[in-house]
């Protein structure tokens, strides 16, 4: 009989949040489009909500496509349950990042702070949306929190990520 007990309580899940290029400038860059909330504010709000839901959450931002790809490759062995990604400008241009997201085998939600469909035509195409469980666009920083709320509900109910 195995009587070994773990001191760590069971967790609901583990989520990786990836922020693409220029998102480190949130709160400073074009606040009329992206708002006054900083990336640190977003990450803090996500971490607080994740902790309340017993979710382990890790956020990563890079202005370099290769660093984002490397992080996704590393995530393959780290038992993540879900991915939230705002690819930034790479949304419209990076087949390589798309391939890395797909290779991660993670269900994911694509988030954009601004309404990309109300902006320049080149921003209206995403290399990610067709494979995402869902997309949240135009709701500012709240979009990240709504993505996490969905994930908490899906993991709590053991739902198929695309069916919640």
Image (cartoon, helix red, strand yellow):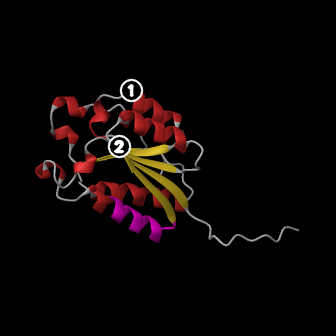
- Residue position marked by numbered label 1 in the rendering: 95
- Residue position marked by numbered label 2 in the rendering: 62
Magenta part mainly helix, strand or loop?
helix
Along the line of sight, the residue nearer the viewer: 150 or 17: 17
Secondary structure under the numbered disc 2 in the rendered image: loop
Relative placement, left or right, of 36 versus 50 is left
Along the line of sight, the residue nearer the viewer: 5 or 63: 63
Residue sitting at the far left: 32
Q: Is residue 50 magenta?
A: yes
At a point 16% along the width and 48% down the height, the residue shown is: 29
Secondary structure under the numbered disc 1 in the rendered image: helix
Instruction: Residue 130 in the image: state x and y as whole percent.
Output: 39, 34
Q: Quadrant of the N terminus?
A: bottom right
- Asked whether disc 2 touches disc 1, contact meaning CB atoms under 8 Å apart, the reply is no
Q: Tell which circle, 2 or 1, labels the residue nearer the N-terminal end.
A: 2
Residue 59 visible in the picture: yes
Residue sitting at the far right: 1
Instruction: Residue 81 in the image: state x and y as whole percent.
Output: 54, 51
- Magenta-highlighted residues: 43-54
């Amino acid at each position: 009989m195995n009587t070994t007990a773990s001191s760590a309580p069971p967790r609901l899940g583990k989520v990786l949040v990836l922020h693409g290029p220029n998102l480190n400038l949130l709160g400073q860059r074009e606040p009329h489009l992206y708002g006054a909330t900083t990336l640190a504010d977003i990450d803090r709000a996500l971490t607080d909500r994740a902790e309340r839901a017993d979710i382990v959450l890790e956020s990563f931002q890079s202005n370099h496509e290769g660093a984002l790809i490397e992080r996704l490759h590393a995530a393959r062995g780290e038992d993540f349950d879900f991915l939230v990604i705002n690819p930034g400008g790479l949304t419209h241009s990076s087949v390589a990042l798309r391939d890395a997201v797909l290779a991660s085998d993670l269900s994911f939600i694509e988030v954009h702070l601004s309404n990309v469909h109300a902006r320049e035509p080149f921003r209206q195409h995403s290399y990610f949306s067709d494979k995402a469980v869902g997309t949240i666009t135009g709701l500012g920083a709240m979009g990240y929190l709504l993505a996490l709320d969905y994930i908490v509900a899906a993991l709590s109910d053991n739902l198929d990520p695309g069916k919640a």
